[in-house]
Amino acid sequence: MPEKDVVSWNTMVFAYAKSGEMASACSLFEEMKVKDVLAWTTMVSGFAQCGNMKSACSHSGLVQEGLRVFESMTFSHGVVPDQEHYACLIDLLGRAGDFDNLINQLQKLPCEPNQQILSALLGVCAIHGNMELGSTAAERLMKLEPQSPASYVLLSSIHATLGKWESAEQFRELMEKRHVKKEQGISWIEQQNNLQTFTVSEQLAGQEEEELPSSPIAGR
């Protein structure tokens, strides 16, 4: 299956999954001759959003089930977990608010946590407003990736959630001072058999900007 066709199929599967039409998404998914990481991720996310408890332990809050799957990797299948697996485990425990178990798992890490683990940790700290642990994760993440905006944005979000608006703004200012830019979101659609990508500030090729109607209260 050509790469372009894979992208087109993934787009359709994503559209159905995003709108909750999982039966249609599954039907298209089964027809795909090539299933890449994006296709599998789309299906897992779609099932999780629709409340299918057997699809994604992290998004469904199935902590014990997730731990069982994680442990079975080694004991039942002989697979040694890597940092990506540990990042999923941290996300699982963090979303459930089980920070005691989360810290215990962090202490068992066979090596220093990488960007994936620290990002997952920072993300769940932002969800629950855990400023102490979040600050530690952010500091380590900033050292690993000083130009990555994730740590600045999430740490600012933690402070804002706790009502610490002044310190939240300081992290935004620190981003500007260090010339760290937040990546702009990109959307992509298929138009007349061509794949088009665009950002919020852009328009599709050939699409003219419409003139806004004058306000009925203009000049008042």
Image (spheres, rainbow, N blue to C red):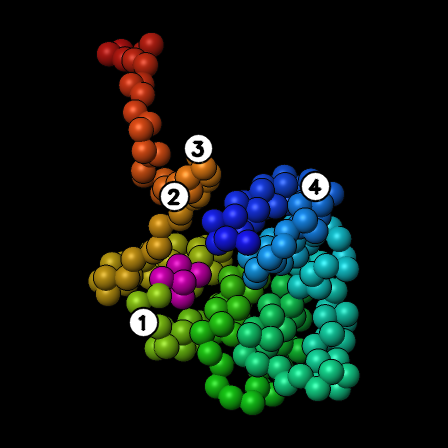
* Mark 3 neighbour density, 10 Å: few (under 14) some (14–19) many (20 or more): few
Q: Which mark is residue 41?
A: none
Residue, x 71% and y 48% (percent of image)? Answer: 26
* Mark 4 neighbour density, 10 Å: few (under 14) some (14–19) many (20 or more): some
* Residue to which mark 2 is pinned: 197
Image quadrant containing the C terminus: top left
Q: Where are the magenta residues, as a range?
A: 149-154
Of the image marks 4 and 1, the number of the one nearer the N terminus: 4
Type of amino acid under label 4:
Ser
Left or right: residue 122 versus residue 56 is left
Quick check: marks 1 and 3 in contact, CB under 8 Å? no
* Residue to which mark 4 is pinned: 24
Left or right: residue 63 versus residue 190 is right
Of the image marks 3 and 2, the number of the one nearer the N terminus: 3
Quick check: marks 1 and 2 in contact, CB under 8 Å? no
Of circles 1 and 3, the one toward us is 3
* Residue to which mark 3 is pinned: 192
Residue 187 part of the magenta segment = no
Alpha-carbon span between mark 4 and mark 1: 42 Å
Alpha-carbon span between mark 3 and mark 4: 23 Å
Question: Up-down: is 76 above or below 135?
Answer: below
Residue, x 60% and y 57% (percent of image)? Answer: 34
Helix, strand or loop at disc 4? helix
Alpha-carbon span between mark 4 and mark 2: 25 Å
Alpha-carbon span between mark 1 and mark 3: 41 Å
Alpha-carbon span between mark 1 and mark 2: 28 Å
Of the image marks 1 and 2, the number of the one nearer the N terminus: 1
Type of amino acid under label 2:
Thr
